Amino acid sequence: APASTGVPHHILGTQSAVLLCGSDFKPECVDVHSCARCRSLAQRHCCASPECAAAAAAEALPANGSGGVAVRWLHIPKCGSTLGISLLQYACTPALPAWHIVYMAMAEKQIDVRMAHAIEARRARDGFRCAGRLVMPFAGHAPVTPAELLLSPSGMLSHAAAKSARGGGLAAMFRTPSQRLISAFLDNYHAWGITRHASRTAMKHAAPTVDLWARFPGVAGCQVKMLNGLDCGALPPSRGAQALLARAIRLLRSDAFVFVGLVERWRESVCLLHASLGRGTAPVEGEMQSLGHSRNSDARRGGGGCRLKDKDGVCYGSAGRGYNASVLRGFRDELDEPLYAAAEEEFERRLRLHRVAGGPAGVAADVAAGV
């Protein structure tokens, strides 16, 4: 049997037993018995819907791991990396055990990168994993592709769908634009793709506060841009902003999306994902936690009072309560605000369609606190 290291590890404890057999994104290289929290968070979570309750009561997934639709994660920055747990739990179990999926989310480095290594997809730009249920790319924040904009989901995925999955499409969480912008600013000015047209050093010098950064060229409109095939931080066209918004809303409301969730209503969203993808899976407790490692996560967890302030002493927000949008000094994201309103409507429609009930009041804020 492989030997144990006994080296410090922030998840498994100060004298952990990580097995010396390779990288720990392989389940056989981690001693599950040394990670009690991994096992605890891998327990089934029973949603309020009959479908989810039935799935949680099931003893195991089908032995062949069959069924379900093919899903491509449209990972909008600061909209919850923890969704990676849900997507692997849906698509890749039992090949990847639930406790190890949770472990990867809790471990160091980026959640999506570590998980991509586990499914041998770190650099994959196309193709499929997990019996055709997971569409590449997985890691990073790739916007909608031209194929996804122009073709129906069945057309986009037809060459893999015939093998093991039925249909398929995009899955995304959306977030209140003001909250997403503040979170991105606190996470080291996180705007995927912005360095293609702006120096990060110059940007930080020109926009030292969140209200200035929100107005910096390329920062706003991230969610609309990604639904138009542009990077989150790309410069939008000088004309035609309303056309971009209209196209994004049309795509959001189409069957190109197999899942639409809201960060502010995280638990309902996770339950909806499992209820709507057709494989009979149920979420685990880890999907209901904020397990990300953004720069602003630790500062907002577990403390009272105001832990983050702007240069004038205005509070950004306290853990679990959301950010104080007044720090934006009146800025409104004219593209993303209407898109988010449409996402709220679409989310409600899908909740009714799949008969997913709401969770306890306030739980979404706890999950969103670290993103």
Image (cartoon, rainbow, N blue to C red):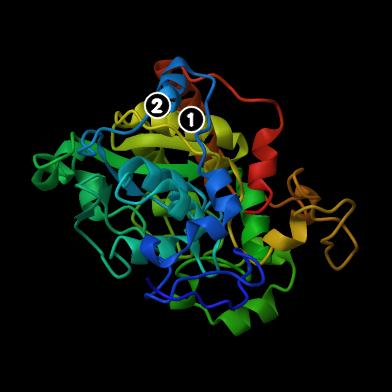
Give the camera-side residue of 338 and 179.
Answer: 179
Q: Identify the residue at horizontal 27%, vertical 55% (top origin).
A: 145
Q: Which residue ends up furthest to the front in the rendered image?
A: 1
Q: Identify the residue at horizontal 79%, vertical 52% (top origin).
A: 302
Residue 232 picture location, percent across and down:
46, 60
Residue 206 picture location, percent across and down:
68, 77
Drawn side of residue 162 relative to residue 278, left or right: left
Estimate how packed mark 2 is, as few (under 14), some (14 to 19) or many (20 or more) residues with alpha carbons within 10 Å: many
Estimate how packed mark 1 is, as few (under 14), some (14 to 19) or many (20 or more) residues with alpha carbons within 10 Å: many
Drawn side of residue 264 relative to residue 258, left or right: right
Circle 1: element type: helix
Label 1: which residue? 271
Circle 2: element type: helix
Three-letter amino acid code at disc 1? Cys
Which quadrant holds residue 13? bottom right
Three-letter amino acid code at disc 2? Ala
Give the camera-side residue of 260 and 117.
Answer: 117
Q: Identify the residue at horizontal 32%, vertical 52% (top origin).
A: 144
Label 2: which residue? 275
Whole-angstrom CA distance, mark 2 to mark 1, is 6 Å
Tag 2 near tag 1, CB within 8 Å: yes
Residue 224 picture location, percent across and down:
45, 49
Above or below: residue 91 compared with residue 119: above
Q: Is residue 37 visible?
A: yes
Drawn side of residue 15 relative to residue 322, left or right: left
Which quadrant holds residue 60? top left
Where the C terminus falls, by quadrant? bottom right
Q: Which mark is residue 224?
A: none
Residue 34 picture location, percent across and down:
56, 60
Where the N terminus falls, by quadrant? bottom left
Q: Is residue 215 visible?
A: no
Above or below: residue 353 compared with residue 333: above
